[in-house]
Amino acid sequence: MKKVDKKTAEAYFRMRTRLIIIFLSIGFIVSFGVAAFAEFFSQFKFLGVEFHYYMGSQGAVIVFILCLFLNAVLSDRIDKKYGIDDTANAAVSDRNTRRNNTQHVTEERGM
Amino acid sequence: MESQMLVSLGLILATFALYIVISVYNRARATSDFYVASRGIPPMWNGMAIGGDWMSAASFIGMAGTVMALGYDGLPYIMGWTGGFLLLTFLLAPQLRKYGRFTVPEFIGDRFESNTAQLIAAIATVIISFTYIIGQLSGSGVVIGRLFNIPSVYGTMIGVVIIAIYATLGGMKGVTWTQVAQYMILIVAYIIPIVFISLQITSNPIPWLTYGGIVDRIGQIDRELGLSEYFAPFTESDKSQFLALMFTLMVGTSALPHVIVRFFTVSTMKAARWSGAFALLFIGILYLSAPAYAAFSRFILMTQVAGSPMNELPAWTQSWMDTGLLQTADQNGDGILQWTELSVGEDIVVMATPEIAQLGMFVIGLVAAGAMAAALSTAGGLLITISSSFAHDIYYRLIKPDASDAKRLRAGRIAIVLSTVIAGLVALDPPGVITQIVAWAFALAGGTFFPVLFLGIWWKRMNTQGAVAGMITGLACTLSYIFLAMSGITLLGIQDTGAGLIGVPINFLVCILVSKNTPAPPQHLQDDVIDLRYPEQMTYKDGEVWINDGTQN
């Protein structure tokens, strides 16, 4: 085990949080944003249909999918930059899971 | 019609045989297998299994019909059910995976160190999954009933028996791989009809590119008939209901216990992110196709069926009129069927469109098999969730902590059989239409769990009292609003299906206010929350972050 500098740890969390906020805002705008101003967007046309309808039936879903894949790729990059290795993650995760599942047999808890 | 029944039945039986073979082959032997398979299913397959689990009778049979009937106002279903995966994959799934508990009630029990909280969560999980499964069972009843020309009541009974058998036999391990198979069958069954119809009416085989033009032409026909345009916003319901329904479905999706449990089968937080992305990709393929299905179906009905003489209606109309879901009446007595004289039940659109477009017996049978796959796969996942909430959270951890593996397994199987039978009985006379029942389950899931899970993961000050109060008021408010709205009392035009917009904010408020006014949780629980900010390899301990580089300390 090695101690991680406080600033480094905070920077990691900040970067991941920033990604989450950015992607969720994009998702919010293409769904709720467009629907809230549907009357306005209906004056434009895209792929042969009114823009608000296009966004509701295709555009928003495609943006959602892109957001998730982009986040997965960018998060992997951030992990790599901070020296995180997923095989090590898997090993730690596996060990913790085993511990959790034997631990709570004896655990005492109040109602 | 006889040969059609044989072909459909043959396809359904062949696909069932496939699921059962996979299920028996993977027969669960130990409880840890039974609940979350063995961890470490690769993200792509896990994503596909989530897709099979996720897409229910409501998505497969109901959604395209709803969009066809409501036009733009049906699109919250498309955006809400897909957008929920954004909330889930960003805000909940990876963190829950690192916390490493089996089920949602178990997470809540451990995060708040409270058996009360766990018990409430387990009961809510059973209520939500139970509500959801009623819709699936009545869906499978409709498909089986139409197939054999028997009352859907008997169809439901047949469906109940099949679901109970394979869920008790295989457990989740079986279900994971059967769900992959079910996903493949249902997506093929959904895509093939719209590719052929697109080819028929636009001579371009790529429906996703061609239906926009069709939507525009439907709007023209609507204008000529003096109706509001198909794509015009907020003609069927208020804008507030549109936004409330979308919010309810999104938040509900991210808080559904049977979907969340799927993320416990991945190995790491990183794998959870990728599983979520793949899940939405596979689910998106169907959701992107539903509006095309809807548009083509409406266009064919408007141009090829409407306008035909009453005594020369195509043969398929009679068999669907027998079910009562298609009605034609020559109101103005001119001997010709007008579009406005045709009343099409939403739930028959997906099943009837291949017949209307004369795509042949094989495609029609394939759609029936796909519909059954959708209903069964979701029902299977729900039963496992009910079973594990009961056997694991209520029986093992609260009633009998010294129960052996064999006893817990038996408790789980008894829970499956019991809940299938009871849900089957309710489904014989369902309390609402399928999509409506399913939307209630989403409102309840969001209203009960989303704020507690979200704050439990991201806010270290969130404590037991807040969680208990939040879950109880959230569940109570959402339930009450559903009943009030059903009896006609609504707020700002929000209907029963949008109840999440009432329950979720109230739950959030109660969680925060109660937590703030009661003592902070113990330090080690607060540390656990900070620990969730980092990947598995990094640990937060005593105010410092440590990275596991292979060396011991």
Image (cartoon, rainbow, N blue to C red):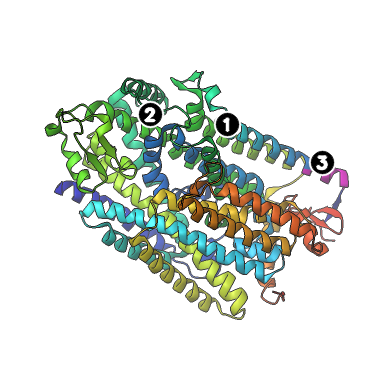
Q: Is residue B467 left or right of residue A45?
A: right
Tag on residue B134? none
| First along the sequence among labels 1 and 3 | 3
For the point 33% across and 28% down, which residue is it? B198
Depth-wise, is mark 2 or mark 3 nearer the camera?
2
In the image, is residue A7 part of the stretch drawn in magenta?
yes
- For this view, does B30 lie left or right of residue B351? right
Residue B212 appears in the picture as rendered: yes
Q: Are marks 1 and 3 on the same chain?
A: yes
Q: CA distance from mark 1 to mark 3?
A: 35 Å
Label 2 – label 3 distance at C-alpha: 46 Å
Give the residue number, with chain letter if any, for mark 1.
Answer: A36
Residue type highlighted by circle 1: Ala
Write the start and end of the magenta stretch as one range.
A5-13
Helix, strand or loop status at disc 2:
helix
Q: Secondary structure at mark 3?
A: helix
Query: Callout 1: helix, strand or loop?
Result: helix
The residue that label 2 is drawn on is: B207
